[in-house]
Image (cartoon, helix red, strand yellow):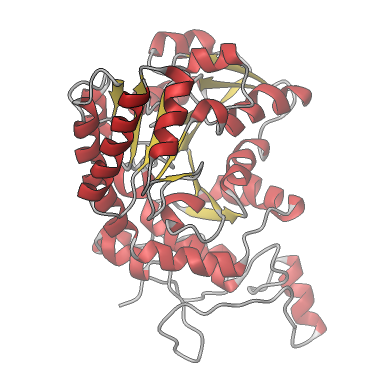
Amino acid sequence: MTLRLPDAADRATALKVTSDPDQFQLETKLVRGGHARSHHGEMTEALYMTQAYAYDNAEMADGRLGGTMPGFTYSRYGNPTVEIFERRMAVLEGAEACFSTGTGMAAVFASMACFLDSGDHVVAPRALFGSCFYVLNTLFPRWGITATFVDGTDMNEWRRAVTPKTKAFFLETPANPTLELVDLKAVIALGKEVGAKVIVDNVFASPILQKPIAMGADIVVYSATKHIDGQGRCLGGVVLADEKFCTEKLQPFLRHTGPALSPFNAWLLLKGLETLSLRVERAQSSATAIAEFLEKQQPLVSRVRYPTLPSFPQHNLAKAQMSGGGTMVCFELAGGKEAAFIFENALELIDIANNLGDSKSMITHPMTTTHRAIAEEDRAKMGITQGMIRLSVGLESAVDLQRDLAQALAVLGKRG
């Protein structure tokens, strides 16, 4: 059984990757979705490390480059290994089409830059990853594209921010690093009402725990660097949407601006997808236990944020739109930045690093890492405090992780 299309080389056909995906369960899609074998019949996906492609004759070159004949022309435009990854992602997400990029931020940028024009307007929550905030707050205004930032939890603010020029809603849910949630159904309904495309960065939830396209979102983006690879090996990004948007807006933008995904990275990401559900479910189980453990560590830990904790302000919304709490835990230390540094430096097992979604647990201080380029006033509006810590839970034993956190807190208690 292979989830594939009759002609693996035909891009127009390959976009229609959801011809009958519902007959298969999630785990099957992760292993076999979009698979296409060469004439050799290889079991694992073939790795095509090539820049260009030879044509049998001049007529074939003319046909392929003219779009009247299926096949590949140049790996900036398309590659067999990359295409298998894109088709598998589309099957997994339930999207009509998918295109990949070299990084997650390239995917975020392309998802908006491919269709926004000077004079257009974007609405987004204040709670955003630092680079996403930069694109909307600094880069786009240079090109005449403006953005209004709102309290993502307040639908009245979303509605008041809309103007006749609003063409897009961009959001993260859960947000980086606060885990603040946005009501997807409500924002999607508002987007349809006002004619704005709803773009969801779904990286914290992963494709396993949340399905924005099934809920009506227009575009979903991922940093495949995170859970999709999940093993610290490579960078990658993904944009998923309907076929019309991808062929008319996204594909030309990607072809001519060049943020192509490496075939080797695509091959690694395909291997990552095979174990995605296993890794996310295991890490999520540990994250839940760790969040519950940290919540008991008063007074050193002043606050813990995790979507499935009863104390989480949006606990009911998390249960409604996510199938689990995820792999990320956010907490605050009462002693601010000094306490955060003492705590991080005392850790023996958990690494200090600003990545996430990895098989290895890692911890970061957002104020001095992922969000350091954001003005202090804007960080405060996002809810990022000096004592805030973001923990990405990996695949180690939850017992060992709790022991490491406990001994680091003990060091902090003695130093405090």
User: Closer to the camera, 385 or 9?
Assistant: 385
Q: Position of residue 319 (x, y in %)?
A: 21, 31
Viewer can see residue 229? yes
| Residue lying furthest front | 414
Up the image or down, 225 lies above or below 378; here it is below
Q: Position of residue 367 (x, y in %)?
A: 53, 25
Question: Which residue: 26% across, 25% down?
Answer: 317
Question: Which residue: 24% across, 61% down?
Answer: 25
Where residue 11 sits, quadrant-wise, is: bottom right
Left or right side of 131 for 3 = left
Left or right side of 166 for 66 = right
User: Closer to the camera, 16 or 268?
Assistant: 268
Up the image or down, 140 lies above or below 233; here it is above
Q: Position of residue 285 (x, y in %)?
A: 21, 46
Quadrant for the C terminus, please: top left
Q: Position of residue 388 (x, y in %)?
A: 42, 24
Question: Which residue: 64% across, 26% down?
Answer: 373
Quadrant for the N terminus, please: bottom left
| Residue lying furthest bottom | 40
Total marks shown come to 0
